[in-house]
Image: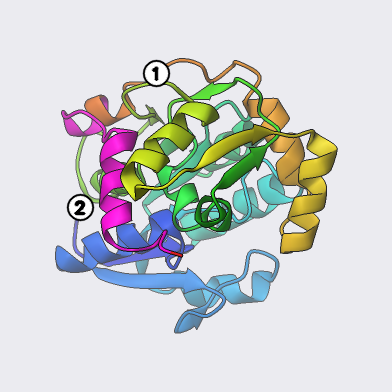
Amino acid sequence: MDAGVVLVVGGTGKTGRRVAERLSALGYGVRVGSRSGAVGFDWQDEGTWEGALEGVSAAYLTYYPDLAFPGAVEAVGAFARLAVERGVRRLVLLSGRGEEAAEAGEKAVMEAGAAWTVVRCAWFNQNFSESFFLDPVRAGVLALPVGGAVEPFVDADDIADVAVAALIGPGHAGRVYELTGPRLLSFAEVAVELSRATGREVRFEAVSAGEYRRVLDEAGLPGEFAELFSVILDGRNASLGDGVWQALGRAPKDFAEYAREAAATGVWQV
């Protein structure tokens, strides 16, 4: 792609930060779109969108807290259309695997008029070290409303590598990449892997959606996450995707490797 500014919406988040770092290392101009960024960006404030798009040739779009949440489709669609009007030629959208509500957001980006790529992901490994599962891992108990559900957890580094390839490389336009890790894991098996990596016990405990909603409320997180658990962990995602292979020609990172790397940083020390 011709050199230009790449907008990374959510550029301080788990995948956005990694995308921005990779693009900068490759010599691309990067604009981090976030509420705290040098150029402020807020999905809920359309007045911040114009400034973020000035001089931008490509954009990586992430919606917080999730593309399946109410209002996301309308905001992402409106922003994608404005981006094309302002000269953006390539859009890469982060989406959730198995989230039917998110597919409308994908469709809105596909129809905006730019070359598009959808990066449709399983649950992130980094949710256990950089997000809402961090404190439970430190406490040694993963209490979640998931039962024996399995998930092919994917690494944020793999997501970022695919997103960067789609933003600046050829052959990715019009593609929907299903990104997963190399194997299915239950949350009980995740707890075993975390125990091995940390050298101390981390156990899994099944709770009801109502109980988990109370936990989320106490942590100041959206209660809708409890419903999202029940929706996307109902077996629909109990299969592997080959998006990392398709986009990069290599295998995705295994959860055990991620856990060892994260443990080495000291993030789970108590």
Residue, disc 2: 1
Relative to the observer, which residue lies in front, 206 or 112?
A: 206
The answer to whether residue 163 is above or below residue 204 is below
Disc 2, SS: loop
Whether residue 122 appears in magenta in the rendering, the answer is: no
- Residue at the (67%, 45%) spot, across then down: 73
Magenta residues span 246-269
Q: Along the line of sight, which residue is nearer the eye, 111 or 125?
A: 125
What residue is rendered at 31% in x and 49% in y? 160
Q: Residue 257 colored magenta? A: yes
Name the residue tied to disc 1. Answer: 240
Q: Is residue 161 above or below residue 111?
A: below
Task: Please identify the residue farthest to the front as the structure is shown.
Answer: 200
Residue 116 seen in render: no
In the rendered structure, which amino acid carries the disc numbered 1? Leu
Colouring rule applied to residues: rainbow
- Horizontal placement of 256 versus 50: left or right? left
* For the residues bearing labels 1 and 2, Cβ distance under 8 angstroms: no
Of the residues under marks 1 and 2, which one precedes in the sequence?
2
Note whether residue 150 is visible. yes
Residue drawn 41% across the image and 43% down it: 125
Q: In screen coordinates, is 65 left or right of 270?
A: right
Q: Which mark is residue 167?
A: none
Camera-nearest label, 1 or 2: 1
Which amino acid lies under the numbered mark 2 shown in the image of this protein?
Met
- Compared with residue 11, is residue 115 higher up or lower down, i.e. above or below? above
Q: Residue 173 in the image: state x and y as whole percent.
A: 32, 35
